[in-house]
Amino acid sequence: MRIRLWLGAAIASIAATWSAAPAPVTLLGTLSNAGEPPEAATSMGSGSAVVIVDVDTLLMAVQVVFEGLGGAATGAQIHCCTLSAGTGTAAAATRSLPGFPIGAAAGDYDTGFDMSQGAVWDSTFVASHGGSNATAFAALAAGLQSGHAYLNITSALSPGGEIRAFFSAEVVPLPATLLLLASGVAGLAGTMRRRAGDRHPEGSSPRATDPSAAQR
């Protein structure tokens, strides 16, 4: 089993990368079948996820490692916002994450998004959270940080979701194939900050960018 404890080096790398910039928030989650539909009851799927949100620049990064699904992955979405932290279900805040590895029981994912663009958003979520991408992102970031949002991986075994992860900003032990992502988190952090600088040069105002440029 390739899942191992991760965290120390990744968090230290993130802190070093962003020490001179307004701090984005790094959120950690452990994927399991807890809270999923009955079809997922027999799932042995597991994994870990990292979401990095920066409400100042409207940038978000998502990294996922998963394995052991009972059916081939069909997609992944972020849902928000549940009534209670760490439990319950909520509508999708995003569309199925572009480029997520489908058709396999295991995989990894590492992509950054410019959330000022509409490509990744579920339009109903935006409409019900202020009507703009900026207000929707503020609501999603708040939901993620408070434990009221989760990443859901759907599969052929359980189309409504086979494994999910609520998020926490606290440093907790994660079963992580994220060893392979530890250096990637820091690299992605740096990329996000560079893109923020490109989008918002000193003395300028934010402007829309091509969503394809925000994805790695």
Image (cartoon, rainbow, N blue to C red):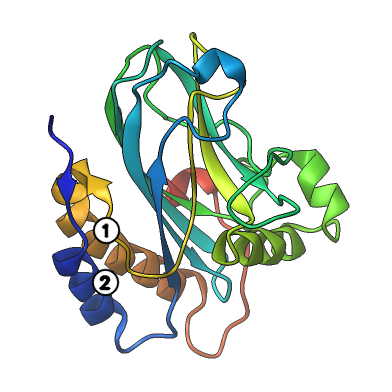
- Examine the image and state in which quarter residue 43 appears: top left
Q: Which residue is mark 2?
A: 14
Q: Earlier in the sequence, mark 1 or mark 2?
A: 2
Q: Which mark, residue 154?
A: none
Q: Secondary structure at mark 1?
A: loop
> Could you tell me if residue 216 is visible in this image?
no
Q: Is residue 117 above or below residue 155?
A: below
Q: As rendered, which of 190 and 46 lies closer to the eye? A: 46
Q: Nearer the viewer, residue 110 or 64?
A: 64
The quarter holding residue 205 reads bottom right
Indicate the position of residue 44 as horizontal and vertical percent values: 34, 22
Image coordinates of residue 92 in percent, x first then y, are: 69, 38
Q: Position of 157 compared to 130: left or right?
A: left
Residue 48 as seen in the image, left or right of residue 162? left
Q: Which residue position holds label 1?
A: 173
Q: Looking at the picture, tell me which residue is in the foreground, 209 or 59.
A: 59
- Residue under the image location 86 percent in, 49 percent down: 127
The C terminus - image quarter: top left
Distance of mark 1 from mark 2, alpha carbons? 17 Å
- For label 1, the crowd category at 10 Å Cα-Cα, with few meaning under 14, some 14 to 19 and many 20 or more, is some
Determine whether label 1 and label 2 are within 8 Å by CB.
no
Whether residue 10 is visible, yes or no, is: yes
Q: Estimate the x, y position of residue 5 in percent, counting from the top left.
A: 17, 52
Residue 22 locus on image (x, y percent) = 44, 85
Q: Label 2's element? A: helix
- Callout 2 crowding tier (Cα within 10 Å): few <14, some 14–19, many ≥20: many
Q: Tell me the amino acid under the disc marked 2.
A: Ile
Q: Nearer the viewer, mark 1 or mark 2?
A: 1
